[in-house]
Image: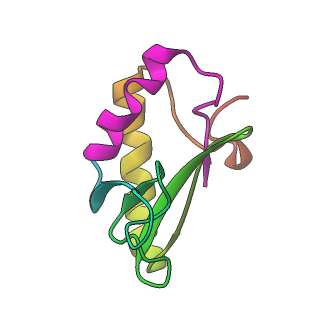
């Protein structure tokens, strides 16, 4: 999933992203390397990519999330982040590729 939270968004947007992360089910924090994920990458549920997990990275196309989990649970989690991010950031957050928001 790629959300329309752009890599070049202003600090007032990026300063709110950790607040959004912390409100989501399964939040673990940022990886610190070794058995605790890749340093600086946010994780939910597990740092182990072979177990149920979600991680995020900032990409040119937006804030990208990848994970391994049941599809129904993923759909619930995705809906939650879009709603929370929209509320916290003050603009509609969604996936450009799905036509949820404009570029």
70 relative to 60 in the view: left or right: left
Please say if 2 is above or below 44.
above
x then y, percent, for residue 95:
62, 44
Q: Nearer the viewer, residue 97 or 12?
A: 12
Q: Nearer the viewer, residue 91 or 44?
A: 44
The residue sitting at 35% across, 72% down in the picture is 46
Left or right: residue 59 versus residue 42 is right
Task: List x then y, in percent, for residue 65.
Answer: 55, 56
Extent of the magenta region: 1-22
Q: Colour mode?
A: rainbow
Q: Inspect the magenta stretch and tell me whether residue 4 lies in it.
A: yes
Position of the C terminus, as image quadrant, is top right
Image coordinates of residue 45 in percent, x first then y, are 32, 69
Q: Residue at x 27, y 45 (%)?
A: 22
Question: Where in the figure is residue 31, as x and y percent of width and height?
Answer: 40, 57
41 is within the stretch colored magenta:
no
Q: Nearer the viewer, residue 22 or 75?
A: 22
């Amino acid at each position: 999933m790629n959300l329309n939270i752009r890599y070049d968004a202003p600090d007032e947007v990026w300063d709110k992203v950790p607040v959004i992360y912390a409100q989501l089910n399964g939040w673990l924090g940022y990886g610190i390397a070794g058995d605790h994920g890749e340093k600086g990458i946010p994780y939910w549920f597990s740092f182990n990519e072979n177990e149920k997990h979600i991680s995020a990275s900032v990409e040119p196309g937006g804030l990208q999330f990848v994970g391994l989990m049941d599809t129904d649970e993923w759909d619930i989690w995705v809906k939650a982040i879009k709603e929370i991010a929209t509320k916290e950031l003050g603009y509609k957050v969604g996936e450009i590729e799905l036509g949820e928001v404009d570029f």
